[in-house]
Amino acid sequence: VLICDDVRSSMRLSLAGSWAYLEGCNVEPDLSCLCKGIANGYEMSAVVGNNRLRKAAGTINATGSFWCNAIPFTAAIHTIETLAQNPSIHENMKLLGEKLRSGLNKVAKGCGVEGFRQSGPVQMPYFSFDQERTKPISDRVLIQTFCSYCARLGVWFHPYHTMFLTAAHTDADIESTLSVAEVAFRAVKSLQRDHIASL
């Protein structure tokens, strides 16, 4: 049985899940765990599966804490319907993610910052610096500096977690983010220069 953990990426990459998003990947999970994006932020999770496991799933009893709460169910239905009726939502999030990724790379390079890395799908970026990848989280000064400077100027990036672009983000948001990132990258470059001078 192949189980896909789509808790973070469900609905963000593709209505059909992350496996469908991966081009050339002809793998279909038997079960997928969905959460977060399925109800656009409301407390909702689901496990969905293929017909091969339907009979076995029917023998399991389950309980839930929020089953009587209609709001998350309504939000999930509307989220799924909205995404199904508007494929441009996913396309736009991908385009904005690509703009953010290429823009951050360009700004980092322009500031002379070394080792800035972005991984994950462009709609769900994760940032790090090569010099810190093996360090404990508490010792990752460059990414902490980058994110704290951004936060002071109104852009919230998480130093140790995947982030998410949404349908609410705009080109203007990306442009202002890149302006803020330039200030943060200059602070990182200063730290990198100080580190080299201390060697």
Image (spheres, helix red, strand yellow):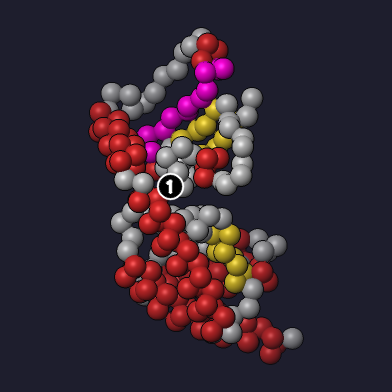
Q: Which residues are magenta?
A: 38-53
Q: Is residue 53 visible?
A: yes
Q: Say left or right for 118 vs 133.
A: left
Q: Is residue 27 above or below residue 107?
A: above
User: In the rendered image, which residue does mark 1 sit on?
Assistant: 12
How far across and down, in percent of the image, does residue 55 sit? Answer: 52, 11
Residue shown at 47%/27% (left/top)? 48
How far across and down, in percent of the image, does residue 35 sit? Answer: 43, 38
Q: Say left or right for 99 vs 196.
A: left
Residue type for callout 1: Arg
Residue shown at 33%/60% (left/top)? 169
Q: Is residue 145 visible?
A: no
Q: Is residue 61 above or below residue 125?
A: above
Label 1 crowding class (10 Å Cα cut-off): few <14, some 14-19, many 20+? many
Residue shown at 63%/29% (left/top)? 2
Residue shown at 53%/55% (left/top)? 121
How far across and down, in percent of the image, does residue 32 sit? Answer: 52, 32
Return the residue nearer the eye: 93 or 104: 93
How far across and down, in percent of the image, does residue 166 sit? Answer: 37, 54
Q: Give the quadrant of residue 120.
A: bottom right
Q: Could you tell me which secondary element the residue under label 1 belongs to?
A: loop
Residue 118 is covered by the magenta coloring? no
